[in-house]
Image (spheres, rainbow, N blue to C red):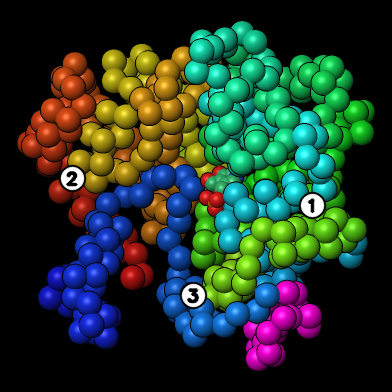
């Protein structure tokens, strides 16, 4: 078991004890708390060995066989391995290609847009407070009150993300009644505004997206279609969710969420587009690829291609669905009524405690979640109405039905306890919930459960 005495990393300990101690504390935190942030996962030792290797020392600007630096014979082979495994994991047809060099999901999106759009082209993407992503062009209007009934947002004046500075953006929302996409409505919006690019995907939409229907909409207006599957990538590669490959024009994803590789991104696109995207990555946007991460992506994809990963991905969804059903028994109000994937979004307004305080109280109990906006949000992202939970890490730990029931029970208990403090200012709320004996008792039980399902650190 991991303890302070049994400290690994002897070299770091010798050269920089302060840093070594801080890393150890983070290892202990990950080991002893339940990470339920849906965008996180826990990588294998094999992936971490690849990432922590000499691969980080090499510059390799360019693409395989066409580098601007010498000494890339093995780097070429490793990048090819990552590309070949991505082809296999996402069942790519011959006329699609792969880029594994984007440093992050945000860069993958930006490079894709730079590759195929002209400045000021119109993008139609999902509204951020409904679960879209910043890199799909977020801007807002500080003078405007949110209007939950208006399904299009096009009044953003404060350009927050660089994508909103470079392109024009309109954002579509979920249906206020169902909190699902009304595809007929999206079609109407597309026909009215005629975007050059439609983007789907987000960080907090708990339901599957109908990629075929979105393709139809894009075709009706002659738009390109980019599907960002950052969250769902692992579930798609395992065949648990449907795939937008061959339907969209471009598919982007992060590699560190459900796909359980290292941090990074993969871009899949038709061959005519992937060449433009390669060029947009370098020289357009980045310098040298992070070869250690490309090695980590290759290592993670080799695991994702194994039959055990399919079982894992199925269990991720099953666990999320069981957790959702259990939470509903405690009168938690789930956005869209449930989930098709690895994440749950809870509208906390009926609980008398909102996302920020709920997340902090849960953290004191050893359950790490995050506050989130939700459809028809009227509050600021700094203090929003919802709480977001996910099952990728706890499923990596091996947890199943029994543990989901227990976790739902603890979540309910913590929220009930924390309610008593909800009228306090945040700092005092934080202090009081940190000291609360009942919350501390739950944290001990959570730690015991974590020890029963240890992470391979
Ligand atoms: C849908 C979506 N796209 C893009 C990203 C950006 O990824 P990164 O944090 O690697 O820039 C995220 C990250 O959460 C995401 O959820």
Q: Which residues are magenta?
A: 62-80
Q: Give the residue pinned by disc 1.
A: 115
Q: Is residue 359 left or right of residue 246?
A: left
Query: Image quadrant for the N terminus?
Result: bottom left
* Local secondary structure at mark 2: helix
The foreground one among 410 and 261 is: 261
- The percent coordinates of residue 383 (x first, y second) are 36, 25
* Local secondary structure at mark 3: helix
Sequence-first tag of 1 and 3: 3
Query: Image quadrant for the C terminus?
Result: bottom left
- Give the mark toward the camera: 1 or 3: 1
Q: Is residue 55 magenta?
A: no
* Local secondary structure at mark 1: helix
Q: Is residue 138 left or right of residue 372?
A: right
Residue 450 placement: quadrant: bottom left
Q: Give the residue pinned by disc 3.
A: 51
- Residue located at (62% from left, 72% from top): 288
């Amino acid at each position: 078991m991991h303890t302070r005495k049994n400290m690994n990393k002897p070299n770091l300990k010798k050269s920089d004890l302060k840093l070594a101690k801080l890393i150890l504390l983070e290892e202990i935190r990950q080991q002893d708390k339940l990470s339920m942030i849906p965008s996180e996962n826990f990588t294998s030792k094999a992936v971490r060995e690849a990432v922590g290797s000499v691969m980080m020392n090499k510059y390799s600007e360019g693409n395989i066989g066409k580098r601007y630096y010498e000494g890339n014979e093995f780097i070429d082979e490793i990048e090819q391995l990552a590309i070949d495994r991505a082809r296999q994991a996402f069942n790519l047809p011959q006329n699609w290609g792969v880029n594994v060099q984007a440093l992050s999901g945000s860069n993958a999106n930006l490079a894709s847009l730079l590759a195929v759009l002209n400045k000021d082209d119109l993008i139609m993407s999902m509204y951020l407070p409904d679960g879209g992503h910043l890199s799909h062009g977020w801007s807002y209007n500080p003078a405007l009150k949110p209007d939950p009934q208006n399904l299009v947002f096009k009044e953003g004046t404060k350009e927050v993300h660089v994508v909103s500075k470079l392109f024009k953006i309109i954002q579509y929302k979920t249906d206020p009644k169902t909190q699902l996409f009304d595809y007929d409505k999206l079609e109407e919006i597309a026909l009215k505004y005629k975007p050059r690019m439609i983007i789907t995907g987000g960080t907090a939409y708990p339901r599957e997206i109908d990629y075929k229907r979105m393709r139809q909409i894009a075709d009706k207006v002659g738009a390109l279609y980019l599907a960002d599957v950052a969250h769902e990538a692992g579930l798609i590669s395992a065949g648990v969710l449907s795939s937008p490959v061959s339907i969209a024009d471009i598919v982007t994803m992060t590699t560190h969420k459900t796909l359980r590789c290292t941090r990074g991104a993969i871009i899949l696109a038709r061959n005519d587009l992937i060449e433009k995207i390669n060029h947009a990555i370098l020289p357009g946007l980045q310098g040298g690829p992070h070869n250690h991460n490309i090695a980590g992506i290759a290592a993670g994809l080799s695991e994702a291609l194994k039959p055990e990963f399919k079982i894992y991905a199925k269990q991720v969804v099953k666990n999320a669905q069981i957790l959702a059903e259990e939470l509903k028994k405690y009168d938690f109000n789930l956005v869209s009524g449930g989930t098709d994937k690895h994440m749950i979004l809870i509208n906390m307004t009926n609980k008398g405690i909102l996302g920020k305080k709920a997340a902090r109280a849960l953290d004191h109990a050893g359950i790490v979640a995050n506050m989130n906006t939700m459809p028809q949000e009227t509050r600021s992202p700094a203090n929003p109405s919802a709480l977001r939970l996910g099952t990728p890490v706890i499923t990596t730990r091996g947890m199943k039905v029994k543990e989901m029931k227990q976790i739902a029970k603890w979540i309910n208990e913590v929220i009930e306890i924390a309610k008593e403090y909800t009228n306090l200012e945040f700092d005092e709320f934080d202090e009081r919930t940190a000291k609360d004996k009942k919350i501390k008792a739950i944290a001990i039980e959570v730690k015991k459960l974590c020890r029963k399902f240890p992470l391979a650190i």
